[in-house]
Image: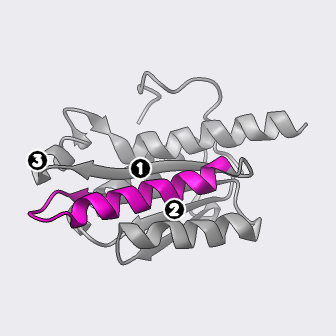
């Protein structure tokens, strides 16, 4: 994937960055595609297998727990959170989305590590498919490259 997402700019050179990717297993058809797109984009921009740590978790609610632990470890330059929550017939969707988004946002607000939120919150499986290489691009790849850009900016601000 080339740098074709209009919101990305600056350096997206992932060479030598240690990047953690947290992937929900729930809605695995979608989350596996998100993961594969993220990994492909990172490798296109300089990452190697040795630079990437991929951790699978049961669902979107578990992503922030592992992301916080990885952030606190000091071992990563960036984190990419990937999941997919599809609207069902109950309010569970709203609660899962709110908690997952708020918790990932709380880690980001610390300002100590680049973290990208690639958790899809959609009404249908078709909408999810449109976001893993369909009509709306590849949100896994975009999240990965966003994390690299933010990591680069954080390093510049530290120096």
Q: Is residue 99 magenta?
A: yes
Alpha-carbon span between mark 1 and mark 3: 17 Å
Could you give the CA–CA distance between mark 2 and mark 1, rounded to whole angstroms? Answer: 10 Å
Asked whether 71 or 5 is in front, the reply is 71
Where residue 118 appears, as percent x and y from the top left, is: 41, 50
Residue 35, relative to residue 156: is it above or below?
below
Choose mark 3 or mark 2, whichever is in front. 3
Q: Residue at x 72, y 68 (%)?
A: 72
Is residue 8 among the parts visible in the rendering? yes
Q: Please state the extent of the stretch shown in magenta in the rendering.
A: 85-109
Question: Percent position (x, y) of residue 77?
Answer: 70, 54
Of labels 2 and 1, the one closer to you? 1
Work out whether residue 31 or residue 102 is closer to the camera in this orientation and state it. Answer: 102
Element assignment for label 3: helix
Q: Which residue is mark 2?
A: 21
Q: Residue at horizontal 19%, vertical 58%?
A: 86
Q: Quadrant of the N terminus?
A: top left
Residue 68 percent across, percent down from the top left: 62, 67
Does residue 28 lie above or below 45 as drawn?
A: below
- Please, what is the dominant secondary structure of the magenta stretch? helix
- Residue assigned mark 3: 126
Q: Residues within 10 Å of mark 2 (few under 14, many from 20)?
A: many
Q: Which residue is mark 1?
A: 118
Q: Position of residue 4 (x, y in %)?
A: 41, 25
Residue reaching furthest bottom? 58
Q: Local crowd at mark 1 within 10 Å, few (<14), some, or many (≥20)? A: many
The kind of secondary structure element at disc 1 is strand
Upstream in sequence: badge 1 or badge 3: 1
Would residue 11 appear left or right of 32 to someone viewing this image? right
Mark toward the start of the polypeptide (3 vs 2): 2
């Amino acid at each position: 994937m080339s740098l074709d997402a209009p919101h990305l700019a600056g350096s997206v050179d992932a060479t030598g960055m240690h990047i953690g990717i947290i992937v929900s297993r729930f809605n695995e058809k979608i989350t596996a595609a998100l993961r594969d797109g993220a990994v492909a984009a990172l490798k296109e921009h300089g990452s190697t297998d040795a630079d990437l740590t991929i951790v699978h978790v049961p669902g979107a609610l578990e992503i922030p727990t592992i992301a916080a632990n990885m952030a606190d470890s000091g071992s990563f330059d960036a984190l990419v959170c990937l999941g997919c929550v599809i609207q069902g017939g109950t309010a569970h969707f709203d609660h899962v989305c709110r908690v997952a988004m708020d918790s990932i946002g709380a880690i980001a607000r610390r300002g100590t590590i680049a973290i990208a939120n690639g958790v899809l919150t959609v009404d249908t499986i078709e909408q999810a498919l449109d976001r893993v290489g369909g009509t709306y691009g590849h949100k896994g790849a975009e999240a990965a490259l966003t994390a690299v850009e933010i990591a680069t900016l954080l390093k510049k601000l530290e120096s």
